[in-house]
Image (cartoon, grey):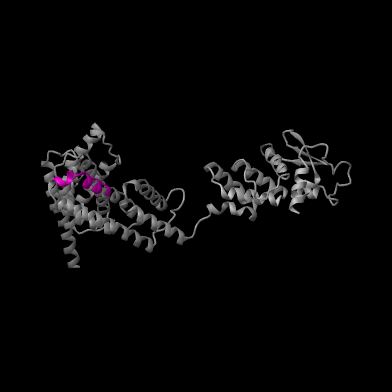
Amino acid sequence: METVDKEEKTTHVIGDRSTSDVVVRLRTQEGRDDWLYCHSEILTKNCKYFADRLSENWPTCQILDSRNCVDVHCQELDFDYYVNLIRLLYVSIDGSVDDLWHGVRNALGVLQVAVELGCPQIVTACVNYLEAVTWEENEEEEILRLVPRMGIQAEPILARLQPVSQSALTNIFVSAIRFATSSPPPEMNDLKSSAQEQIEYMLTEDDDAPLLTAEDNIRHEVKECVNRLFSRFNNSLIALFCDSPESLSNAGNIQLFLSYMTDLTWVCQILSKLEIMREFVEYWFDASEKIVKVLGQESSAKEVTEIKLRAIEVTSKVLETIGYGIVILPTVKRLHVLKLWLPFVRVTKPLIDSAIMNGEDGMVLKMDGELWQSLESTFVSIILALPSADQAEILTEWLENECIRYPDLTEAFEVWCYRSKVAKRRLSLLGDDHAMTNSI
């Protein structure tokens, strides 16, 4: 039977007027009218539309020439797809020939026509092709626009675009966060950066909702990964802290420490999105004294300046979390972290600004343009939340320092002056109110 089919298909050739018994007239609203000389045996075999039009049951079958000429109306944009479909009816589509579609757009156009005219064999072949090949972004948009209208027969095309289950999302997130917080060989750094970017994308709310919600199992896994990162960072910090001052000039030590610091900068963003910054803040508080001491060592290595910038970026996130009450720390801890990082930032900012401006040794520092302004505002917020005596101590040191230009604590100074001046009057009023309440 298969041999007979192939013989039939090779016997008849589209456009052969000597053997043609039916003309297909493709007509458009723009006036295009093309005649294709075809064979009813071929047209009716795999196309319901032609089978109906050329059957004895068609209402106009008795009209003169109605069975010898079939009109097909189409849009000008779809004209070539109709021609291609009719040509495909003459081809044996048995899976042995794959190069029939000439790209995604043509296959999609032929699929539309095949669905409309009822050509199941061509529909299946188009679907198999489109489901298997890669798509450009504009082709994907076109598929999303057209395929859902084609019914269940075209659904396999959309399989790669369907939302996945929550368990699948969780599994890929867990794998990605483990890799993104690991310390792979240098040749895998690009892959690690990609994992970090995609994790951030998963958790970001833009035009669409985040891909993942901050469920307990997600938070737990992130905390475990961050704890392991902290452990490796702490080992590196201890080595730098305990070794000789020359240890910070060692290229291997610097690159490893910079890698950890860069990861911690990224981790801050993820923990903020998941609203689980407390453990990070506590760790950074505990490690701050060692970090400041290590980075305060004299070193000529240009990478040390970048490490200092990354440390300030992490500190900025931590202080912001403290300053705006996202994580609550007691006064003694808030005062301690200020006394550590305020002098460090004050001295380090001119060095970073100079390195960026002069491009020393070709070094390129990537930083948030709003970092210094944001950090300055955070310092002011934390200072104003301290007891007035502690504020006075910090402001005194600021006014006496030659680096008074940054951070600018003028706002904190003005508020402290106002509060100090009216303090006795306010407290006396409170005392009067208290006395009146007791007398009543």
Determine the residue positioned at 77% across, 50% down.
Answer: 4
Image position of 371 with respect to 434: above or below: above
The N terminus - image quarter: bottom right
Q: Is residue 251 magenta?
A: yes
The C terminus - image quarter: bottom left
Residue 295: x percent and y percent? 17, 46
Indicate left or right for 79 with 169 as reference.
right
Indicate left or right for 242 with 223 as reference.
left
Determine the residue positioned at 69% across, 51% down.
Answer: 121
Residue sitting nearer the eye, 335 or 420: 335
Q: Which residues are magenta?
A: 246-259
Q: Quadrant of residue 376?
A: top left
Residue 245: x percent and y percent? 13, 46
Q: How many marks?
A: 0
Is residue 419 shown to the viewer in this render? Answer: no
Q: Is residue 170 magenta?
A: no
Magenta stretch: helix, strand or loop mostly: helix
Q: Residue furthest top?
A: 358
Is residue 193 shown to the viewer in this render? Answer: yes
Q: Residue furthest front?
A: 3
Indicate left or right for 97 with 383 as reference.
right
Residue sitting nearer the eye, 426 or 417: 417
Residue 31: x percent and y percent? 74, 33
Residue 240: x percent and y percent? 17, 50
Residue sitting nearer the eye, 398 or 110: 110
